Image: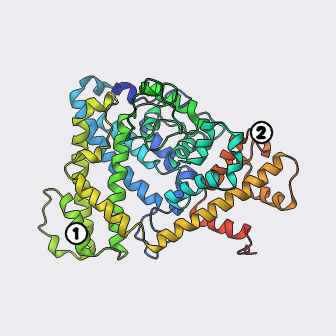
């Protein structure tokens, strides 16, 4: 891969825009994401803790903003080091362009997450895999069916920013190909078919997938524009090497969810001060503790959190540059965070979070509720839309159709003839809901609560 192509300013489906307002194309990407309705809805989507009494803990919105800040720092540091080695790039790019691309991709990294976090993804997949949605298996091809039975928020995010936002415009938000490629941590389709002479090893980095069948041609355009090489052993499937800056997007997310979720757990009393301090101390590097003892416990943890993030940004940027050759060759099969000297300390934080934070009763209750709420909404809307498509709709389902915005049906407010497209539009509707709206609508539709006058 070559950096000049990787940093393509070309807009998906369009030519590069000329800057007339002092912003770079990558700054425009950032701004378009910020002002999108899908990004705004993240303010009522749970990060870890559902509807906490404390207003300190994170939502998907605050998490995304923090990841974006960390990603910008990583991109700036990496950009400077790359430009110092590649003088020709300096004629067209600055270190801040790297930071802007990573920041924009980080900002959107959770934009496709459904209500109830990752359990929401499982709930949608479970509905099709083992619920009433299983009846559609024989009506779809294997790749379309896998899109649904392994529903993926990353693929939904790519669909949102390239198609659902500004649906009448090719390219949706019209982001640069560089930002879209960096956003796509898993540049492959949901179902892979290896060549007969392919290797038997598993790709460690690609546990998930990055786009649905409905957007495969859009990602193909992104991959070709940025020069991402296809994986030869998967020449029967769509599978590319990861954009180098996607490693930084992933690293920024890893930093924030491990460190910030830990701090949230402390603030909510799930971990003691001593336990939290012991977990963060190994990450602070050589940071001075001169005024540490003068702070209260909350401020001490905040101080250690800040120093840990600063040290991790420095170490991860160094690791990226050290592995740049392998990354550009598409040969790095580990995430960056596994390559730094404090990897074990971060892994310990992850283990503690799984045991002591992510498994608390309120989190588990939310996950259980997600299966009922999202499965129930999917079933309600899918049955109504299918009856509508067959012109034998019941009075009950006529009222359900009236609850659906027309863009989730099809052209002219009529259901799409293609069953795959029809089902995707309904998953668009349900996965795009906020936590509160999904619960409220489910309760009203099921008659558990009645709307106010």
- In percent of width and height, residue 102 lies at 38, 42
Residue ID at (38%, 68%): 357
Count residues near mark 1 (Cα–Cα under 10 Å), then give few for <14, some for 14-19, many for 20+: some
Count residues near mark 2 (Cα–Cα under 10 Å), then give few for <14, some for 14-19, many for 20+: few
- In percent of width and height, residue 326 lies at 28, 31
Q: Earlier in the sequence, mark 1 or mark 2?
A: 1
Residue ID at (51%, 30%): 238
Residue 425 shown left or right of residue 93 in the figure: right
Residue ID at (41%, 66%): 358
Q: Nearer the viewer, residue 33 or 74?
A: 74
Q: Helix or strand or loop: what does disc 2 sit on?
A: loop
Could you tell me if residue 391 is visible in this image? yes
Quick one: quadrant of the C terminus? Answer: bottom right
Q: Helix or strand or loop: what does disc 1 sit on?
A: helix
Q: Which label is found at residue 277?
A: 1
- In percent of width and height, residue 418 lies at 74, 38
Q: Which residue is mark 2?
A: 417
Residue ID at (55%, 46%): 156
Give the spatial CA distance, label 1 vs label 2.
Answer: 58 Å
Residue 124 shown left or right of residue 360 in the figure: right
Quick one: quadrant of the N terminus? Answer: top left
**Is residue 42 shown above or below 178?**
below
Q: Which label is found at residue 286?
A: none
């Amino acid at each position: 891969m070559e950096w000049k192509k990787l940093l393509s300013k070309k807009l998906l489906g369009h030519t590069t825009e000329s800057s007339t307002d002092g912003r770079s194309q990558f700054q425009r990407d950032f701004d378009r994401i910020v002002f999108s309705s899908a990004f705004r809805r993240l303010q009522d989507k749970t990060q870890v803790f559902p509807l906490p009494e404390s207003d300190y803990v994170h939502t998907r919105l605050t998490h995304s903003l923090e990841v974006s800040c960390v990603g910008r720092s990583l991109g700036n540091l990496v950009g400077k080091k790359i430009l110092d080695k590649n003088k020709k790039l300096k004629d067209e790019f600055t270190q801040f362009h790297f930071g802007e691309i990573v920041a924009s991709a980080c900002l959107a990294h959770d934009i496709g997450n459904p209500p109830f976090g990752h359990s929401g993804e499982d709930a949608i997949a479970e509905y099709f895999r083992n619920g009433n949605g299983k009846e559609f298996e024989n009506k779809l091809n294997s790749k379309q069916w896998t899109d649904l039975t392994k529903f993926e928020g990353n693929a939904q995010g790519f669909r949102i920013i390239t198609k659902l936002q500004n649906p009448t415009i090719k390219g949706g938000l019209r982001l640069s190909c560089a930002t879209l490629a960096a956003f796509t941590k898993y540049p492959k389709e949901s179902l892979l078919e290896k060549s007969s002479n392919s290797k038997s090893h598993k790709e460690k980095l690609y546990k998930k997938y990055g786009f649905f069948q409905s957007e495969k041609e859009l990602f193909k355009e992104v991959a070709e524009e940025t020069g991402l090489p296809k994986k030869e052993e998967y020449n029967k499937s769509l599978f590319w090497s990861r954009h180098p800056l996607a490693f930084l997007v992933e690293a920024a997310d890893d930093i924030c969810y491990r460190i910030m979720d830990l701090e949230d757990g402390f603030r909510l009393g799930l971990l003691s001060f001593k336990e939290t301090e012991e977990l963060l101390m190994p990450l602070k590097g050589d940071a001075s503790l001169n005024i540490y003892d003068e702070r209260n416990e909350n401020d001490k943890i905040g101080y250690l959190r800040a120093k840990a993030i600063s040290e991790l940004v420095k170490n991860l940027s160094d690791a990226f540059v050290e592995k740049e050759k392998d990354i550009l060759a598409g040969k790095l099969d580990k995430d960056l965070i596994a390559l730094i000297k404090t990897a074990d300390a971060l892994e310990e934080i992850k283990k503690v979070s799984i045991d002591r934070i992510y498994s608390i009763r309120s989190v588990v209750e939310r996950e259980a509720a997600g299966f009922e709420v999202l499965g129930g909404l999917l079933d309600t809307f899918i049955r109504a839309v299918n009856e509508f498509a067959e012109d034998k709709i019941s009075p009950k389902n006529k009222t359900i159709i009236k609850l659906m915005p027309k863009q989730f049906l099809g052209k002219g407010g009529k259901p799409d003839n293609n069953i795959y497209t029809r089902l995707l539009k309904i998953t668009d509707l349900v996965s795009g809901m906020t936590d509160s709206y999904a619960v409220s609508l489910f309760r009203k539709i099921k008659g558990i609560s009645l709307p106010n006058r």
